[in-house]
Image (tube, rainbow, N blue to C red):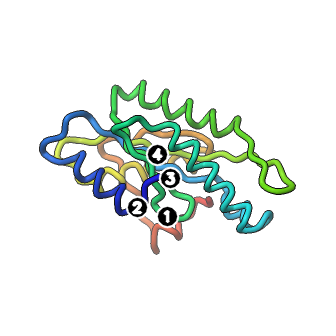
Amino acid sequence: MSNRRYLLENLRRKLGPHRASAVAVVLLDLDHFKQVNDIHGHEVGDFVLKHFAGLLQAEVGRQELAGRLGGEEFLLVLDAGDASRLLARVDRLLERIRQSSLAPPGRILRYTCSAGVAQALPGESESQLIRRADAALYQAKQQGRDRGVLAGADAVMPERRGSRSQRTAPD
């Protein structure tokens, strides 16, 4: 599992002028993760994060990346095919997460996540691409969570006050 810096540097390189293939990102956020920490404690929350990271790592191919951006937010950098195949891949991943269970000491837990998917546009920077994936993630949360949403070319985050962590949509 890559750290934030390594992940973003490699995404930047993949988006560079000599890119060999189409690139897509999937921004994933665990649904209601704050409740896991509040109800079960931070040790169980850490167990969930490690389990989730393992599922994501198993999803990526040799030239693809998975990493944690921070908190309960993760990023996949994938070789992008057409949109329908990309969304089918994300749907399979979400189903795998939904069906998995983990057993931290004394418990059995299930969890879900939401995903924002964006295919790189010509000349797009890594921050622009991630912002579009973030807008799609926000839509997935607004639509009920536990789903993936594909960003359009014009996707932008809705206007609101405060930082990204102060969104009106809960975890």
Image coordinates of residue 68 in percent, x first then y, are 48, 57
Q: Which residue carries the number 4 mark?
A: 116
Q: Is residue 99 above or below residue 135?
A: above
Q: Earlier in the sequence, mark 2 or mark 4?
A: 2
Report how far apart the C-alphas of labels 2 and 3 lie in the structure: 20 Å
Q: Earlier in the sequence, mark 3 or mark 4?
A: 4
Image coordinates of residue 137 in percent, x first then y, are 49, 49
Q: Which mark is residue 70?
A: 1
Report how far apart the C-alphas of labels 1 and 4 lie in the structure: 16 Å
Q: Which residue carries the number 3 mark?
A: 138
Image coordinates of residue 10 in percent, x first then y, are 29, 52
Residue in the picture at 52% in, 38% down: 58
Report how far apart the C-alphas of labels 2 and 1 lie in the structure: 7 Å
Q: Is residue 79 above or below residue 42?
A: above
Residue 98 falls in which quadrant of the image? top right
Asked if the residue under mark 4 is in contact with the one under mark 3, i.e. CB atoms within 8 Å, the reply is yes
2 vs 3, front mark? 2
